[in-house]
Amino acid sequence: MSAVAKILVTDDEPAIRRLLGTALTRAGYRIIEAGSARETLAAIQIDKPDAVLLDLGLPDRDGLELVPLIKGAGAAVLIISARDATDQKVAALDLGADDYVTKPFDTEEVLARVRTALRHRLSAETQVPIVRVGDVEIDLAARLVRRAGEEVHLTPKEFGFLAELAKHPGRVVTHPQLLRSVWGPGYEKDVEYLRVAARGVRKKLEDGLVEQSIIRNEPGVGYRLSSR
C-alpha cells in the first residue's frame, strides 16, 4: 500500500462525491471520482485505488455486480447506499464488501470505517497471524486466545467463531458466512448457534459492559470484531 492511500469515490450524485471527497482529502487521502460503473472499472485499472466507496444505484450497472470485480483487483470496498434493506446488506457483504454504510451518513463515521478497512487490507497483505483487541490477543496460527497475558479456554466452536471475525477485524461477517465457515454447509439458517457462541466468547473475554465488548452485533446481518 502506498504511503498516501488512494480512495475512489463512486456515486452518480456530484454533491455526494464532493462531500466525501472533501472529508477524505482533509483526512490526508488522495481522491479519485467516478460517476458510473464504466468509470469505476476504468479507474480500478488505471489508478489502482486502495479502497472504493461504492454507491449501489449507478446509472449503467447495479453496484453489487462491481463488488467482486473491485475485490479481485485488491481494493477494499465500502458500500455507501440508500438501500437499507437487510437482504441488500447481506448480499453486498457476502460478495466481499468490507463494510456497509446507509445514506444519510455521518462523514466522521465513514472516515472511521475507511481507516478500519485499510488496516484490514494491510493486515491481510502481511498475513499477520495474531490479532489484538484491547487486552485480548487472538493467535490464529497457534489457535490460542489470551486476555491480559493469561490463556483463555474456548470451545472449538467459540474459537472458530472468534477466529473468523479476527480474520476480518472491523468488518461485518454475515450470519451465513460464519455458519458456513464454522459449522459447515447446510447450517446457514441456524443463527441461534451464533448467538450461543457469541454469548460464550463474551462471557470469557469481556467484563459485561457494552462499551468494552469486543464483539459487535449487527442485527439481522452478522457480527464484527471491534477495532478498539
Image (cartoon, grey):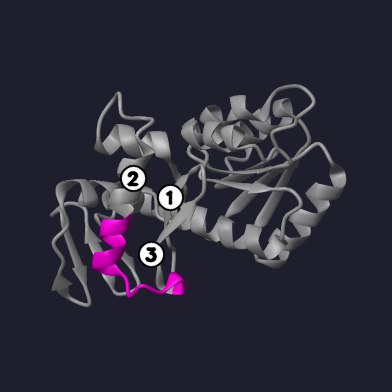
> Residue at left 46%, top 54%?
217
Q: Name above or below for residue 145 compared with residue 6.
A: below
The location of residue 121, given as percent across then percent down, is 44, 50
Which is more toward the observer, 42 or 142? Answer: 142
Q: Is mark 2 on a helix, strand or loop?
A: helix
Numbered disc 3: secondary structure: loop
**Amino acid of disc 2:** Leu
Residue ID for mark 3: 214
x and y percentages locating residue 45 in the rendered image:
59, 32
- Tell me which numbered mark, 2 or 1, is placed earlier along the sequence: 2
Q: On the image, numbered disc 1 is attached to which residue?
A: 223
Task: Please state if 79 lies on the left or on the right of 216 as rendered.
Answer: right
Closer to the camera in the image, 223 or 146: 223
The answer to which of 150 and 74 lies nearer the viewer is: 150
Q: Where is the C terminus found, in terms of image quarters?
A: bottom left
Say which residue label 2 marks. Answer: 194
Q: Kindly tell me whether residue 1 is visible in this rendering.
A: no
Lateral position of residue 99 relative to residue 46, left or right: left
